[in-house]
Amino acid sequence: MATLKLTALRKNFGPVEVLHGIDLALTSGEMLVIVGASGCGKSTLLRLVAGLEAITSGAIELDGRDVARLDPAERDIAMVFQNYALYPHMSVFDNMAYALKIRGLTKPDIAARVRETAEMLGLAPLLARKPRQLSGGQRQRVAMGRAIVRHPKLFLFDEPLSNLDATLRVTMRAEIKRLQRRMAVTSLYVTHDQVEAMTLGDRLLVLHEGRAVQLATPMEVFERPANTYVAGFIGAPAMNFLPGALSHGGTAVSLDLGPVIPFADGKRDGAAGQRLTIGIRPEHIAPVPPGTDPTGLELQVDLLEPLGSETIVIGRLPNNELLSVKLPKNDAPTHSMRVAFPATHLHVFDAGTGLRLDPT
Amino acid sequence: MNNRTDWTAHIVLGLGVLLFLLPVWLVFSASTQNPAMIGRGELSFIPGTGLDVYWKVLTEGAPGVAPVWHLLLVSFGMAMAIAIGKILISVLSAYAIAFFRFPFRLACFWMIFFTLMLPVEVRIIPTYAVMAGFGLINTFTGLTMPLIASATATLLLRQTFLAIPDELVEAARMDGAGPLRFLRDILLPVSAANIAALFVILFVYGWNQYLWPLLVATDSRLDTIVIGIVKMIGADTSVEWNRVMATAVLAMLPPVAIVVLMQHWFVKGLTEGDK
Amino acid sequence: MERRTLFGGWALPAAFVLPQALLTILFFLWPAGQAIYGSLTRQDAFGLKTQFIGLENFVDLFTDPLYIESMWRTLGFCLAVTFLSMGVALLLAVFADREIKGRGIYRTLLIWPYAVAPAVAAILWILLLHPQIGMVSHALKTIGINWDYKINGTQAMLVVILASAWKQVSYNFIFFLAGLQSIPRSVIEAARMDGARGWRSFRTIIFPLLAPTTFFLLVVNLVYSAFDTFGTIQAMTQGGPGKSTETLVVKVYRDGVVNLDLGGSSAQSVVLMLGIVALTVLQFRFLGKRDKT
């Protein structure tokens, strides 16, 4: 159990800077999920912490000790790789024992620790098998076991579930969470999958183009996204964005499409007419009976995506922009519907910077 | 969907097999027949009864040529020395080139690559002169050493090593393995199949050498079986054909056996690496 | 191609490349340099005096009708061996790629000749085609063809071509088969859906997709037939009768080792080197281009 602190971490590949100064502190036992689209630098960040890439500048402190210049082996960090990276010629037992052997543990110690870990992961009957004789889920478990058996200070997970099929991914996700809680090992978990990010993390770090755009709990990220990028990245189907302008002395937005919606949570600073981007999640858009709500808009249904428990309606607004709406199962219209944007669920962003505007 | 026997395929492949097997069968058949009959052109498809010719060539050889057991021994020694020697130095150099960055790394790579374009045949005389300078003419070292350094094995192994997933290397580093330990514990075992394939290719290459032994080893004690066989028919007028043919069979057996027995690895190694 | 993960330090890798580097310099680069140097000099008959003569050896070479003749002969020989062995190999590979019973056995029976030494392949064909003992030659004589490759140069050429091509079929077969197997089934199935099958499918889909393999083999076979066939030719004809099977490599050997014309033979070595360099460059340019597309 350890704390991890990253300070002003930068990484250049040649002339290209891929991480522009990341600051981050993990408390002991915390699971922090780094999430972002591919190419955002999340894997690089993980590899810097692992010691597989050299940092360009900054500091990495593990339990108060600067490890940034140390070899990976000296950092006492274990990593679970995307493709598991099991040694194909070694049995499950030897895969898990390898790091312990290198550290010079005695044979009985190694056997005891491997066995203990294998029991915990349900791998005991498989110890003699080679990786190729295992299913995807079992390999995943061995990869975890190989990390756990070392009792490291820090776990790193590099998209460990991305090679599993959908059902298995759900099972393993739950298992990783359970294990991590139980062992209370400080962990960094990299993924591009927002469901994994939301369910696994104590906190999320959203990376975008090498910068940390938001660091908060999953619910906070979902409910108060820091900018339009985060807002569009987290949540499925993605948040709808509508252009508008600040009006009524900062207490309402006047959408370009016509309706004026008052802010339910308070007044925003800014000049009248300041350009805004209004975000609203598909599940928060409400269908309204014709004529009952003056702020309602006509939506021409373009496509229906029935998902069983709910239906996604993709429709065209009067200005021909697309809008997605999530409806309970039976409410799906066929041709058109009227929708309103409830004032309580608006996300307000500055149209220029994309940053969230909170009430003053 | 289509369960009919594909007769065309069977006929074409059958003819192909015959094209290869028939000459060999004839050679075997001839080895068991009376040399005078062969000399008159009365060669028969049906083997005679004289398998004792094999014993004779093994122990006596033929006029002007060492006993075949000795030829086989030299060939085997040469093939093994070349195969093992090449694998050893190639594993090391390919490992260095694929897994490290060091000064002159690219220069080393291109130098090795360039030797692809310098087979023995194009540098006959000067290589001979170099060997003479070292006093290596008519020595086993002279026979094998210049053939140990060639690019093929290094380039094939480099391909193999580059195909090792980065994650595997990283996992080993996270587990605390240094470069030597990684080479021994991970890289070599993981590449075992490719190295086996390479062994087959190099063994056959070494066994089948002709020009180099012809040049560098004039001493008949260093005659390989390939050299021996050509010497046997060189006399032309008084050739004992049954002995020649028995020797030919013995010359083919070891490399063919290795190729057939290790076929699976060999085919993979050959086709995966070379492109 | 580079690895993402590399080990640090340079002493260990330097020590690791050293053996190969030494052997390469000693037995490849140094002799090659000597060949180039030798090609620019002339030695007197006793090897006492060496004189720098510039490109004179090359001028001599390319004005020597015997050398020019040998070049054309080699070219013809190489093309014949290459097309013959590749043609037969492709035919066999296409059928061995079909879903038929016993194809594993067929493959084994078609692969083993890879292991036969070129010189030993010559023995096999001598038994068939030798003017006195050859089975086929007797058959030819009975139908009135006067078969004696020891006298008839054209026949001698034919004989070395057959023996050389025969030995190379397996190698080509292995690569063609691997090439065929790497063509995605779905592509061939798509062609079938479009109505192309049999010969048309082969000509319009399979053969074009095999092009990288074919080109690779073309170069390999040209090199093989130019260089590795020395053993075959030496065992069968020693370049004769006369000079009718004297390829460039046989000529280097004859002039250098047998006749001890060092300057001339060095110049010939340099010409061969240039030829092989040209082929290699061609191959890599072609393969490189394909990789990018």
Image: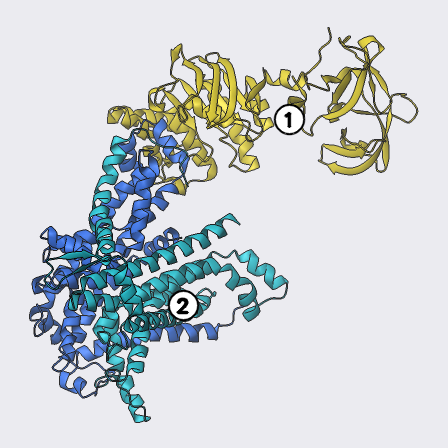
Chain colours: A yellow, B blue, C cyan
What chain does badge 1 belong to? Answer: A
What chain does badge 2 belong to? Answer: C
**A182 relative to B127, above or below:** above
Q: Secondary structure at mark 2?
A: helix
Q: Position of residue A343 (x, y in %)?
A: 80, 16
Number of marks in the image? 2
Q: Position of residue C283 (x, y in %)?
A: 41, 56
Residue B208 seen: no
**C40 relative to B26, above or below:** above
Q: Which residue is mark 2?
A: C86
Q: Position of residue B184 (x, y in %)?
A: 26, 37
Residue A233 is marked as: 1
Q: Residue at x 73, y 6 (%)?
A: A360
Instruction: Determine which quarter of the picture holds residue C190.
Output: bottom right
- In the picture, which quadrant includes the N terminus of chain C? top left
The amino acid beneath tag 2 is Met
The amino acid beneath tag 1 is Phe
Instruction: Determine which quarter of the picture holds residue A234.
Output: top right
Mark 2 neighbour class, 10 Å CA radius: few under 14, some 14 to 19, many 20 or more = many
The verdict on a common chain for dots 1 and 2 is: no
Q: Residue at x 28, y 31 (%)?
A: C10
Residue B42 seen: yes
**A253 relative to C116, above or below:** above
B6 left or right, relative to A345: left
B88 left or right, relative to A83: left
